[in-house]
Image (tube, rainbow, N blue to C red):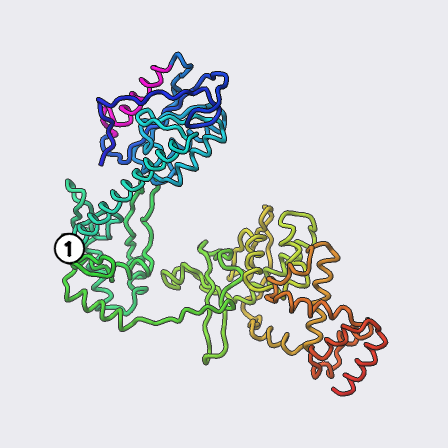
Amino acid sequence: MTNEPEKKQHFAPAPSLTYGSAGGTAQPQKRRLLGCAIYTRKSTSEGLDQEFTSLDNQREYAESYIKSQQNEGWTASPELYDDGGFTGANIERPALQKLLAHIREGKVNCVVVYKVDRLSRSLLDFSQLLEFFDKHNVAFISITQHFNTNTSMGRLTLNILLSFAQFEREIISERTRDKMVAARKRGQWIGGVIPYGYQRHSTEQRKIVVNQEEGNIVKRIFDLYLNKVNSALEVAQILNADGIMTRAWTNKKGKASGKKKFYITQVLFILKNYTYVRKVNFKGQVYPGQQPAIIDEDTFAKVQAKLLEHRLDRKAYKNKDCSGLLSKVLKCSACGSMMVHTYTTKKGRHKYRYYLCSNAQKRGYAECPHRFVNAQTIEDAVIEAVKRKLAEQPEGPFKSERDAILSPIWDTLFFEEKRRIIRTLIQTVDCDVKNQKVDLILNGSSERLTVAVNMKTEHYKTRAKNLRNIANEAPIRKTLIHAHHIKKLIDENRIKSPREVCPWIHINETRLDQIMNTLLLSPLIQEEILSDNPALMRISERTIRDLTTLPDWNQQSQQWREIISKS
């Protein structure tokens, strides 16, 4: 549906523009000169290559209207604000954004459009634009629709016009979607990325034909998986060894992509694609297609059965301990690929975490000599290196994150907060397994730090083991240590209130009060609690809560001795 202006359209009467707010009349003021910016828009790009377009027509009408108001001080801006091929459903349009920028700079004090829906078809967006115009003392004129937004009737008229414009846009969108659904169910190609093995028809835009060279590769992929190997990864390795690359293509912005080695995911996509058997998979339903087939249905069915037979069902573990602190930071120095965090289990109990080179994971271990590295080993080495470097340079950016990693409370922070701090402080980490080292660069610095790491002989330290060591501490000792750490943060002005640590260590305010009350114990009792007295293991934290309510330290000591003697 096009929005071509009619040639016999009559102009709306010119509103009086001796006002200071946008869109209508106000109290009489001194008449001002208006630099009128003409905004034009066309929803589709169809016909924009013609000598005279709908945009030109809209602009011609607007210029004639402005010329008729020359005696009122109106002048047309020579700047073009034309959006051809952009929807009115949003304001993400280059010419409109340029117009808004010029309004902010004070270059424009009047916006002229042919019709209201040329500016926007969204009621919300239009109301926000009017508010923006009013804020910058900019008039808004629709030359074919007269309304005064300073009156309730005028605002009602404008809202009705915009509601119908938005309704029209939604109806057009629904028709387009229904048309595309119907075309897809008939097996037509409706656009998008053309599957590997096909190419666009030379004359018909909505039709694809077989690309013979790529089609032969598709046949080979199906043959390899069905008759020679048992995994898609092995198929990808064979293709890459033979120098076969993915298709090279260029997007609308001119960016070149493709022409790379095959990933396992790309091979699986080809093996599961119904397009190759002249079918269309649309929203889970399979329909007959109109494109020529590359693979016969019998071969395709056997491949699907084999894929199902070799499928591994994986549980979606949500345990945060399965994530890595260096995820999206750690890179493989051998091939430059990111290293992803993963794990394996032994006898269903022991969990072994490690970082795996994504290149080796997707294309096979032959692609990268490093493969994987112990997760706990490299995480400990990187964190210690960062702590040493920050301790040497107390001043620098990211003060709160620097204070957190250097604080004794670091070990008590929950995992997501630790990972956020690591990503804030560290720009990149390059892992060199061969030379047993890591190179890291901190954010805000160009200096490369090199840290030697024994990745082969160092024993694996699981998080579970560390948690068991912490669990072996006496409960009252752990509570008092937490209290002193929090007090230190307050004394050093790192936090303004103890409440700030609640989300760090996953406690509520009631539990925080119980922890901080242990500081009310006498110094002698606190010193004894922090000692290695094995008798403390038999004293529960609840037992000493009554002590913290006693203001007299002598009474506290007397009751403490009674508690010790009973344990």
The residue under label 1 is which amino acid type? Gly
Identity of the residue furthest to the bottom in this view:
566
State the residue in front, 236 or 419: 419
User: In this image, 248 relative to 397: left or right?
Assistant: left
The residue drawn where x is 21% and y is 49% is 178
The residue drawn where x is 70% and y is 51% is 394
Per the image, is 67 magenta? yes
Q: Secondary structure at mark 1?
A: loop
Packing grade of label 1 (10 A; few <14, some 14-19, many >=20) is many
Per the image, is 453 magenta? no
The residue drawn where x is 31% and y is 17% is 64
The spot of residue 498 in percent (x, y) is 68, 60
User: In this image, 178 relative to 529: left or right?
Assistant: left
The residue drawn where x is 28% and y is 41% is 169
User: In this image, 341 relative to 206: left or right?
Assistant: right
Q: Is residue 381 above or below residue 168?
A: below
The spot of residue 75 in percent (x, y) is 40, 16
Tell me where the magenta segment starts and ends, as one range: 48-69
